[in-house]
Image (cartoon, rainbow, N blue to C red):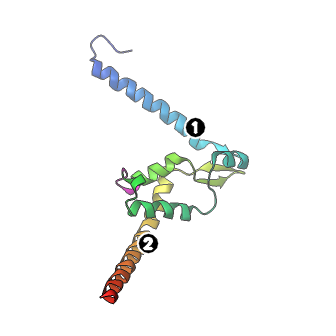
Amino acid sequence: MASKNSSPKGTKKQTKMIEKMSKKRVQRQYNDEIISEEELENRGGIIGSKVEYLNLHLKMYFEKHLYYHHLKTLSDLALYIYREKKLYYSKHNGFKLMEYSSILTELSTLSKSEQELLEEQKEESRMKTKKYKNWKR
């Protein structure tokens, strides 16, 4: 508990810090957990092609999809994907949850190519609409 001389704000900060630390401990336990294939299926995890899954999220992020309006940076997107707890990789006869830093690394490597691809598609659609408008006249 707080001492007699401490302020109420100090005790609030201490309790928040304690709560945060306990959440981190639980999170570490969850991250270190190696699960079986049956448990992976129950959780709805993905082990196959992570690239396609991440490209889907990147495409929707770059297109400013309504569902992703609150995400400002790639690190926010990586945190969002991490909290979904869907990406796993095989390890020691089981599967382990992919970490936030690994997801962020994958996203940053894929983002440039995905962004260029979307720009090309937008440019093609602009050209098609321009041709259509010129043809109609």
Residue 22 position within the rendered picture, expressed as x and y whole percent measured from the top left: 49, 30
Residue 17 position within the rendered picture, expressed as x and y whole percent measured from the top left: 39, 29
Placement of 26 over or under 62, stated as above or below:
above
Q: Assign a secondary structure to mark 1.
A: helix
Displayed quadrant of residue 134: bottom left
Q: Quadrant of the N terminus?
A: top left
Considering only order in the chain, which callout, 2 or 1, is on the residue closer to the N terminus? 1
Amino acid at the residue labelled 2? Ser
Prevailing secondary structure class for the magenta stretch in the rendered image: loop
Q: Is residue 74 magenta?
A: yes
Q: Assign a secondary structure to mark 2.
A: helix
Q: Which residues are magenta?
A: 70-75
Left or right: 58 with respect to 89? left
Between marks 1 and 2 in the image, the one whose residue lies nearer the viewer:
2
Residue marked by disc 1: 29
Neighbor class of circle 2 (other Cα within 10 Å; few <14, some 14-19, many 20+) is few
Query: Cα distance, mark 1 to mark 2?
Result: 35 Å
Q: Which disc is residue 113 wearing?
A: 2
Displayed quadrant of residue 77: bottom left
Q: How many marks do you count on the picture?
A: 2
